[in-house]
């Protein structure tokens, strides 16, 4: 059974067409579901100054926070190709700011294959705000 509701899949396919990836040619779409149940979508947005490019997962997370929410309960990522791409290391870290380790992360290829994981499996021993407290307060 698919772990992706039809409306989420439809949104991912739509977002994939909106990705701005003229340099890599690799379009990525992401959807995060917040605690309220709302869906926030994002795409990768590249830049002629390459390092300023933004990943899809980060775009979706920024949309959620900008809308006033700060808790992610489920994540979907879609790309094209034989294998579903997993979130890059930076995106795993950005997601972990707002999503607990048990959060399901569904990686889909528009061509079919899926990979299902949790954020904790993708980013074990994540750095988090708990480390920002001095050692004496831990
Ligand atoms: N990309 C994402 O949007 N998310 C990821 O987690 C991996 C990579 C984008 C960045 C760049 O625009 C393109 O994919 C190729 O790396």
Image: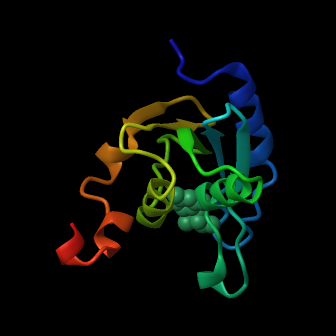
Residue extending farthest to the bottom is 49
From the viewer's perspective, tell me whether residue 129 is left or right of residue 31. left
The answer to whether one can see residue 128 in this image is no
Question: Of residues 31 and 14, which is closer to you in this image?
Answer: 31
Which residue is at a point 43% across and 34% down the rendered structure image? 115
Where the C terminus falls, by quadrant?
A: bottom left
Displayed quadrant of residue 63 = bottom right
Question: Of residues 32 and 56, which is closer to you in this image?
Answer: 32
- The location of residue 118, given as percent across then percent down, is 38, 38
The answer to whether one can see residue 110 in this image is yes
- The location of residue 120, given as percent across then percent down, is 32, 46
Image quadrant of ligand 1 equals: bottom right
Which residue is at a point 61% across and 51% down the rendered structure image? 70
Which residue is at a point 47% across and 42% down the rendered structure image? 83
Displayed quadrant of residue 76 = top right
Which residue is at a point 76% across and 35% down the rendered structure image? 11
Question: Of residues 21 and 137, which is closer to you in this image?
Answer: 137
From the viewer's perspective, tell me whether residue 137 is left or right of residue 69. left
């Amino acid at each position: 059974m698919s772990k992706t509701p039809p409306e989420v899949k439809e949104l991912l396919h739509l977002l994939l067409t909106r990705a701005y990836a003229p340099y890599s040619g690799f379009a990525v779409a992401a959807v995060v579901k917040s605690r309220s149940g709302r869906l926030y979508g994002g795409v990768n947005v590249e830049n002629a100054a390459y390092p300023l490019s933004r990943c899809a997962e980060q775009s979706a997370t920024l949309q959620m926070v900008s809308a006033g929410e700060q808790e992610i309960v489920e994540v979907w990522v879609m790309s094209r190709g034989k294998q579903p791409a997993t979130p890059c290391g930076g995106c795993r870290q950005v997601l972990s700011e707002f999503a607990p380790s048990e959060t399901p992360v569904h990686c889909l290829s528009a061509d079919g294959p899926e990979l299902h994981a949790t954020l904790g499996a993708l980013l074990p021993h994540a750095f988090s705000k708990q480390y920002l407290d001095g050692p004496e307060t831990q």
